[in-house]
């Protein structure tokens, strides 16, 4: 009998707890269900040109972290893997999800311009890093590439001093506006140092291994190695440094761009003495999320372009 009374008491307690949970009685935590998850108010599509470059991986990660601060915001990411046709398909797929706003870092700005013009008629468009010609976008956010090149040129000129020396410049790609802007800024700064000459320009497609190969090829045919290598991102600068080590070329100094944190990032390479300097290049991810929310709430920005300045990083 006592056992039955004890069992009945436990059963009644369980029933009471379950009832309290269902009714939401204070002091009792109700179990979370799928209905408890916050509703998505805004759906954003992020079309990335590629995830081969560490800087673009960082861009996506920072954008994801910025979006996570807003419970009612969800972002769908795509990776075009450096293929413009694939990015066009990615954008069409994102539109099929009925996104409220598109963020895109174009693989080829000119090829994507007519596509973005069509999308801009339907939803807001934020362009990151590589701008498109015309006015068919809501906001462009990107680094000040001319200033990146100019400050890099000043750094190299001061490194070589009055005696001067030779420089090899490693470009990201051919026929790219950011590449051209960085190179033009670099040349303009170098022009103020009459004893500094740009010996050669190499193209390495932003990739470490390709920069290593291009610099090896250059060292084989060159009479003497350059005094400085300026690469338009840290990965290419590191690739050139690896080539120099393999060919036992010492004395050449290296300058890069991106200034990312973490193992193998520009900050780490400067700390280890592999790079003489790097320049932090903001991804614009935090700004993209901040402005996206403003735009979607009806607060359209009074500017069409937001240009982010670099920061020099040295030991």
Image (cartoon, helix red, strand yellow):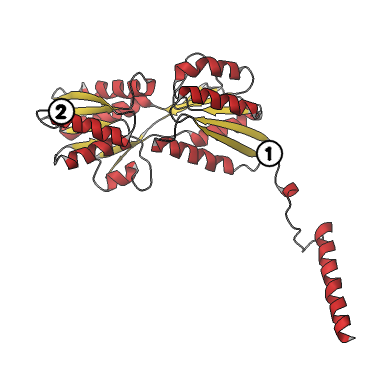
Q: Is residue 246 above or below residue 229?
A: below
Residue found 63% across the figure and 38% down from its top = 73
Quadrant of image for the N terminus? bottom right
Between 188 and 110, the one nearer to me in the picture: 110
Residue 134 shows up from this direction: yes
Residue 24 shows up from this direction: no
Q: Position of residue 288 (x, y in %)?
A: 53, 32
**Disc number for residue 166:** 2
Between 188 and 302, the one nearer to me in the picture: 188
Q: Position of residue 48 (x, y in %)?
A: 49, 31
Q: Is residue 277 above or below residue 221?
A: below
Residue found 49% across the figure and 22% down from its top = 85
Tally of numbered tags: 2
Given the current orientation, which residue lies at the most extreme right position?
Answer: 1
Quadrant of image for the C terminus? top left
Mark positioned earlier in the residue sequence (2 or 1): 1
What residue sits right under mark 1 in the picture? 40
Q: Position of residue 110 (x, y in %)?
A: 45, 16
Report, in whole angstroms, how far the alpha carbon at label 2 lies from the one at label 1.
56 Å
Say whether residue 295 is left or right of residue 313: right
């Amino acid at each position: 009998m006592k056992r039955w009374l004890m069992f009945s008491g436990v059963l009644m307690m369980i029933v009471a707890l379950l009832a309290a949970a269902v009714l939401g009685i204070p002091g009792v935590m109700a179990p979370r269900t799928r209905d408890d998850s916050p509703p998505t108010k805004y759906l954003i599509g992020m079309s990335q040109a590629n995830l081969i470059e560490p800087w673009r991986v960082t861009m996506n990660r920072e954008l994801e972290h910025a979006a996570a601060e807003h419970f009612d915001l969800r972002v769908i990411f795509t990776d075009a893997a450096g293929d413009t046709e694939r990015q066009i398909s990615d954008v069409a797929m994102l539109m099929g999800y009925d996104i409220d706003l598109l963020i895109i870092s174009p693989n080829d700005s000119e090829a994507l311009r007519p596509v973005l013009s069509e999308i801009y008629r339907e939803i807001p468009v934020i362009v990151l890093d590589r701008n498109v010609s015309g006015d068919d976008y809501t906001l462009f956010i990107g680094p000040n590439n001319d200033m990146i090149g100019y400050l890099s040129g000043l750094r190299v000129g001061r490194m070589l001093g009055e005696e001067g020396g030779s420089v090899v410049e490693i470009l990201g790609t051919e026929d790219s506006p950011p590449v051209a802007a960085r190179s033009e800024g670099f040349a303009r700064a170098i022009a103020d140092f009459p004893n500094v000459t740009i010996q050669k320009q190499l193209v390495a497609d932003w990739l470490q291994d390709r920069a290593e190969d291009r610099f090896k090829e250059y060292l084989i045919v060159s009479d003497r190695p350059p005094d400085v290598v300026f690469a338009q991102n840290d990965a290419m600068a590191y690739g050139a440094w690896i080539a120099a080590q393999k060919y036992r070329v010492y004395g050449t100094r290296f300058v890069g761009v991106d200034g990312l944190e973490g193992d193998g990032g520009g900050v780490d390479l400067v700390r280890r003495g592999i790079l003489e300097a790097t320049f932090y290049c903001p991804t614009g991810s935090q700004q993209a999320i901040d402005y996206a929310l403003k735009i979607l709430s009806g607060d359209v920005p009074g500017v069409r372009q937001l240009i982010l300045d670099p920061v020099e990083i040295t030991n």
